[in-house]
Image (cartoon, grey):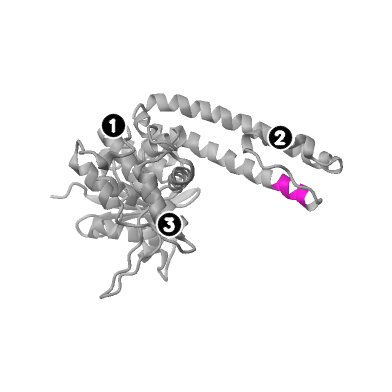
Amino acid sequence: MHEYNTVVGLDLSDKKANFCTLDWDSGEHLQEGKVALTKSGLKNMFGGMERALIVCETGTHSPWVQHTLEALGHAVFVADARRLRLISENDRKSDKHDAELLARLARADLDLLVAVHHRGPKAQADLSVIKAREQLVRCRAKTINAVRGIVKSNGDRLDSCAASSFTKRVREQIPKALRTAIFPLLEAIEQMTKSIQQYDRRIEHLCKEYPETEYLRTVQGVGPVTALSFILVLEQPERFGNGRDAAAYLGLVPRRDQSGDSDPQLRITKSGNKLMRKLLVQCAQYILSRGRDSELRQWGQKLAGRGGTKAKKRAVVAMARKLSVILYALWRDESDFNPFHLTKPPEREDIAEELEEASEEIAVPA
């Protein structure tokens, strides 16, 4: 006896969604059509329907669509769009056919679809603070580069300095002929800096709501932004069997294309959250270049010292992967970071094993 009598394929567009409802046992078409991609539209269409399995692909709208449909009593399966080549490379691709194909794949075997976990509404809202801050940081960096470029094209150069002190440091260095053009940009940079500082204070406040971030911040080079992002992106340590699974979730493990005797080392998968991966790489760069002495830093320096044009880049990405394993272990076991953990008898053997296994693989950057 099946839990559901029907399965619904839901192809999400920007303003509307195509749906196709199939009978679970026979595969017969029961209903198909379009629905407005709004909360009220979904409630009107699926609110009075008997509990069904609804399948959709990842996208901009998939998180809130999943929460809305689950609140209506349905089971929702979100499939990784990148893994569905049967849909993306279909010669008869259309929204209507995509919805039907999603329903038929789910009816045949859900394991054919790679499930994607969407974080809860609060975690999603809190992570939006970090995303908004990152957008401002990128805009400020581009504006600073634009100012430097304009001055350079006039035959002058501005002093190197931190982005947070850029406007105060270079204001008097701007040539008089360019001040009318550049001063408004400096004002915009100053305003963005103030907004970023406001986001920083908000993130510090959010860290108090997630006390587990304190364990992660005991690693030198891991600040509130990285620690909070790690907690919000992974959401629950119980979702992963070990730190290696967490690193794979973040896209920091190499791809694999093994066939016969051929098993080349490929670039990292880059799956999962792009911002989290970027933050881990930045932390690894800091630890490698300016961090205090630790086993992680010594291991990274050893990799970077092997030579080659990409040795340092490979070392940084490998350190980012190993750092993700360490952060996961600290979070899971609610413990502070020991920079020389493996040189002493470990309190838990499985943590040491995870760190040793993590060091065996070197992720290759793109």
Q: Position of residue 70 (x, y in %)?
A: 32, 39
Secondary element type, mark 3: loop
Magenta stretch: helix, strand or loop mostly: helix
Please tell me whether residue 147 belongs to the stretch shown in magenta: yes
- Picture quarter containing residue 264? bottom left
Q: Which residues are magenta?
A: 146-152
Amino acid identity at mark 3: Gly
Closer to the chain start, of discs 1 and 3, is 3
Q: Position of residue 98 (x, y in %)?
A: 39, 60
Find disc 3 in the rendering and name its residue. 305
- Circles 2 and 1 in contact, beta carbons < 8 Å: no
Residue marked by disc 2: 169
Q: CA distance from mark 2 to mark 1?
A: 41 Å
Q: Point out the frontmost of discs 1 and 3.
A: 3
Query: Which residue type does callout 2 highlight?
Result: Arg
Residue 42 picture location, percent across and down: 40, 42
Q: Is residue 82 above or below residue 176?
A: below
Residue 272 in picture, x, y percent from top left: 39, 50
Q: Visible in this render: residue 212?
A: yes
